[in-house]
Image (tube, grey):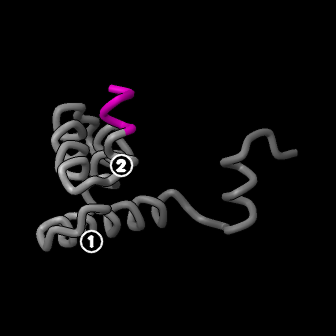
Amino acid sequence: MITSKDELVNDQLKITNEEKEKYFEMCYYYFGKSAEYGIYESYYYLGLMYLNGNWIEKNVNKAYYYFCLGAGNSHALSYYELYKM
């Protein structure tokens, strides 16, 4: 019996923890690369990864930094995350 949303997703997609870790490592790498080129949406997603500690060490200061970079480019969700902090 499925007891949580995560179990449902994992059951449907058949994703292992190793595959999840590889996926988040790839996301972190490519968000970092796109941030180097000034793609402001990547600042927001990097901020979320640091804020929530998704497969990287949780760091609120780095999350704040990336949300500020996103907000500096008028990214609405970055403003919202700064407001919540």
**Tag 2: residue type?**
Trp
Find residue 82 and report its horizontal and vertical position in percent.
30, 34
Q: In this view, does 76 lie to the left or right of 34?
A: right
Q: Quadrant of the N terminus?
A: top right
N-term-proximal mark, 2 vs 1 = 1
54 and 42: which is toward the camera: 42
Tell me the SS state at disc 2.
loop
The residue located at (24%, 40%) in the rendering is: 63
44 and 20: which is toward the camera: 44
Determine which of the numbered discs, if any, sits on residue 55 in the image.
2
Q: Is residue 52 visible?
A: no
**Tag 1: residue type?**
Tyr
Determine which of the numbered discs, if any, sits on residue 81 in the image.
none
Q: What stretch is highlighted in magenta?
A: 80-85
Q: Is residue 20 magenta?
A: no
Question: Residue furthest toward the front?
Answer: 74
Quarter of the image where one finds residue 36: bottom left
The residues tagged by marks 2 and 1 sit, at their Cα atoms, a distance apart of: 15 Å
17 and 46: which is toward the camera: 46
75 and 34: which is toward the camera: 75
For label 1, count other residues whose C-alpha is less than 10 Å away and answer few (under 14), some (14-19) or many (20+).
Answer: some
The residue located at (25%, 44%) in the rendering is: 67
The residue located at (39%, 47%) in the rendering is: 77
Between circles 2 and 1, the one closer to the viewer is 1
Q: In this view, does 44 lie above or below 30?
A: above
Q: In this view, does 63 lie above or below 35?
A: above
Find residue 6 and report its horizontal and vertical position in percent.
66, 48
Q: Does the magenta stretch include residue 81?
A: yes
Determine which of the numbered discs, if any, sits on residue 30 in the image.
1
